[in-house]
Image (tube, helix red, strand yellow):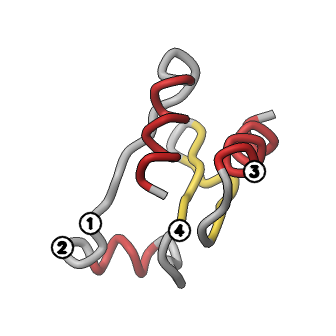
Amino acid sequence: MRPIVDAVASEYRDSFTVARLDIDANRETNKEYGGNGIPAYIVFRNGEVIGSLLGAMPKQAFEQRILDILE
């Protein structure tokens, strides 16, 4: 998924920010946001969780799901 996430982050760098969290080094943060699987993606707006994605998926699906959440 890393190449897909990096590609989407690059394509949409003017629209939203993609950040990574090392769950091994940040176990409490992972628990706080309910990270139940790997890979897990949490979408925030103004510091609030507005959606999440779980599991690997093709680029087109990943991109569309993020865009749908951000609508």
Q: Secondary structure at mark 2?
A: loop
Q: Is residue 49 left or right of residue 38?
A: right
Position of residue 51 relative to residue 54, above or below, is: above
Q: Which mark is residue 61?
A: 3
Along the line of sight, the residue nearer the viewer: 56 or 15: 56
Q: Which mark is residue 22?
A: 1
Pointer 2 with pointer 3, Cβ within 8 A: no
Q: Secondary structure at mark 1?
A: loop
Cα separation, mark 2 vs mark 3, equals 29 Å
Along the line of sight, the residue nearer the viewer: 45 or 12: 12
The residue carrying pointer 4 sits among few (fewer than 14), some (14 to 19) or many (20 or more) residues within 10 Å by Cα, namely some
Q: Position of residue 49 (x, y in %)?
A: 60, 54
Amino acid, disc 3: Ala
Q: Which mark is residue 40?
A: 4
Amino acid, disc 2: Ala
Q: Position of residue 57 (x, y in %)?
A: 66, 61
**Which residue lies at the image location 49% right of the left edge and 46% below the top edge?**
5
Position of residue 4 relative to residue 13, above or below, is: below
Quadrant of the image for the C terminus? top right
The numbered mark, 2 or 3, whose residue comes first in the sequence reads 2
Q: Secondary structure at mark 4?
A: strand
Cα separation, mark 1 vs mark 3, equals 24 Å
Cα separation, mark 1 vs mark 4, equals 11 Å
Along the line of sight, the residue nearer the viewer: 26 or 57: 57
The residue carrying pointer 3 sits among few (fewer than 14), some (14 to 19) or many (20 or more) residues within 10 Å by Cα, namely few
The residue singled out by tag 2 in the image is 25
